[in-house]
Image (cartoon, grey):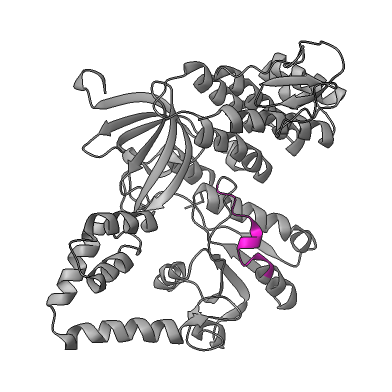
Amino acid sequence: MAAARGAAAVRHGSKLFSPPIQRLIDELSKLPGVGPKTAQRLTFHLLRLPPEEVLPLARALEEAKERIGFCRKCFNLTEEEECELCRDPRRDPSLICVVEEPSDIISVERTHEYRGRYHVLGGALSPIDGVGPDRLRMEELFRRVREEEVREVIVATNPTMSGEATALYIAEELRPEVEAGKLRVTRPAAGLPMGGDLEYADEVTLSRALAGRRDV
Amino acid sequence: MAGGNRSLETPALVVSSRRFKEADQILTLYTRDRGRVSAIAKGIRRTKSRLGGRLEPFSLVEISLHLGRSSLYSITGAQTIRTFQAVRDRLYRMDEGARLLEDVRRYFPEEEENAAAFNLLVRAVGYLSLAESREAAAGVVLAARSKLLVAHGYLPELDSCQKCGEDEFLCAFDPSLGGVVCRDCYGEGVQDCFRLSDQGLTALREVLVRPLSEAAEVRVSKAVSGEVERAVSRIFDHHGH
């Protein structure tokens, strides 16, 4: 879609802007959530700024792209071979929290409740879009579970159809270890958001909340 | 929209969703009153969105849509009719159901009302939610896909050769002709024609006439269901929108 938007921008703007400006608009419009108009606005904003304010942005982009890669263990973003979370000896290596994207790690970390390690899949299974397990870091996860002494895998994929499909697939693949009593595969509880009103809760969330009720 | 009325309330089955911008989703819906439509659900990915989990694929909802200045509908409200949660509780149901939804997304015309196709689709998802095995789920989906062909006006002709009219020695299927051909006509300069065994032909006839409620019980070999699958897919490919 971004490419199509870019192409549209070229069609409409090719005679209006000089090639360097058009290139910048095209590149910016490839970013998620940035359409041709926003890209144009950002371009003119950047061009209005003095060089000492714009060049650090260009350098930061280059530096991040050059220096940041994936952790060889959990596939989080890192400057080193292994990320800070995998190297931290205070974290419990027998717990693995599986997430779709590196940004999900930040959300879990913000809770200050979880002291285990992570595994980033790089997306979720989507039968409808043809995204199968081979497109995700599934094998790497199963290898970790079998080679390291893991006692619990928490599948924290999104509570969407793709996230649920991913959780079901992981649970199915790890069933032998679970049945042998070596491992637990769990999923974070689904329910009502704190501060929300019961009145506005949707039926799916509410039924999940009721199914997962606990003693008080 | 007729009479300048730019709002619409209709039952709809959620076909697919994809992320858009910060917290939005663009959904494909199959509605009873307007066929397949695309609509934006603003802010749906925020945990406190009132649309919340209502608009997951396979859900049947009463949807409120508004057509603004863009060509995309905006979702202004949704009430659950059936969640069909059981489809999302088993991977094999999701896998098989995905092919049904893929047909809707690829071949069903946009903004073209077809209440028969809508009702059939909803019933198929209902039976899919009850399927106790992958084979049963596959049976439901194959039968539903075949019947959806008919609901869209593509009834395959299975009783006589589509080239010469011969009603014996039928041995192949030609999607461009929309039916079977005999052994003498098979291979006469046709590109898309493929062999159809006697069992394949019988199975294809059967899925078209047997009620959907019995589809989960039909057991055919993988090779035979593959032939039926191929015939259905090729007709959609050839004639679908």
Image position of B180 (left or right of A211): right
Q: Position of residue B205 (x, y in %)?
A: 75, 17
Residue B3 drawn above or below residue A196: above
Q: Quadrant of residue A185?
A: bottom right
Query: Total of numbered circles in the picture?
Result: 0
Q: Position of residue B42 (x, y in %)?
A: 30, 46
Q: Is residue B207 magenta?
A: no
Image position of A113 (left or right of B151): left
Q: Quadrant of the N terminus of chain B?
A: top left
Examine the rendering and report whether any part of residue B58 can be seen.
Answer: no
Image position of A79 (left or right of B153): left
Give the camera-side residue of A62 and B193: B193
Rendered residue at 27%/71% (across/down): A24
Span of residues in magenta: A129-139
Q: Is residue A134 magenta?
A: yes
Give the camera-side residue of B106 and B91: B106
Residue B156 drawn above or below residue A191: above
Q: Position of residue A188 (x, y in %)?
A: 52, 58
Rendered residue at 75%/22% (across/down): B204
Examine the rendering and report whether any part of residue B139 can be seen.
Answer: yes
Image position of B130 (left or right of B13): right
Residue A108 drawn above or below residue B207: below
- Residue sitting at the far front: B189
Residue B210 drawn above or below residue B64: above
Rendered residue at 68%/42% (across/down): B92
